[in-house]
Image: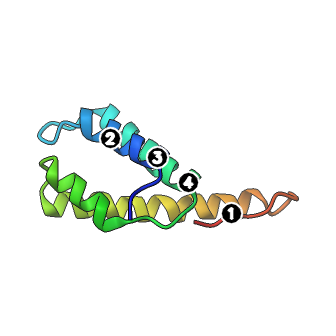
Amino acid sequence: MALPARSQKALDLYLEHADIEVPHPLDAQRWRAFIVAVRLDGGPVDYASVRGQLVDCGFGPSLAECLIDSVEDGLELLDLWDIHSTLDSDRPVRSH
């Protein structure tokens, strides 16, 4: 299963600029932008595809797995944000 266009574009941007050996603060910002794109796309995430793309770009399997874990954690945090920010609102709660 392919990622939606917005998510894939954000992942491509991260992979194009990420420095595997000496992480840069913008790497973290780009990765978080990818997580937000995944959330905005709202569909299921093909973690195997993301992991494969990370490994294909030179990330070791353990680092790729840590990044995948951070996607799951980020999506959970965004879900909690939605729940708590809508308690006093009429906006519906979205889920991924």
Residue identified by numbered label 4: 41
Q: Is residue 2 above or below residue 36?
A: below
Helix, strand or loop status at disc 1: loop
| Other-residue count near label 2 (Cα within 10 Å), few / some / many at <14 / 14–19 / ≥20 | some
Q: Amino acid at mark 3?
A: Ala
Foreground tag (1 vs 2): 2
Residue identified by numbered label 2: 12
Helix, strand or loop status at disc 3: helix
Q: State left or right for residue 60 relative to residue 95.
A: left
Q: Which of the two labelled residues, at mark 1 and mark 2, occupies the earlier sequence position?
A: 2
Q: Which of the two labelled residues, at mark 4 and mark 1, occupies the earlier sequence position?
A: 4
Quadrant in the picture for residue 63: bottom left
Q: Which of the two labelled residues, at mark 4 and mark 2, occupies the earlier sequence position?
A: 2
Q: Amino acid at mark 1?
A: Arg
Q: Residue at x 78, y 59 (%)?
A: 86
Q: Amino acid at mark 2?
A: Asp
**Residue contact at pointers 1 and 2, CB within 8 angstroms:** no
Q: Quadrant of the C terminus?
A: bottom right
Q: Is residue 30 above or below residue 78?
A: above
Q: CA distance from mark 1 to mark 3?
A: 20 Å
Quadrant in the picture for residue 48: bottom left
**Residue contact at pointers 3 and 2, CB within 8 angstroms:** no
**Res. 5 mark:** 3
**Res. 94 mark:** 1
User: Residue 53 at x, y = what percent?
Assistant: 23, 53
Q: Residue at x 34, y 32 (%)?
A: 26
Q: Residue at x 25, y 61 (%)?
A: 51
Helix, strand or loop status at disc 4: helix
Foreground tag (1 vs 3): 3
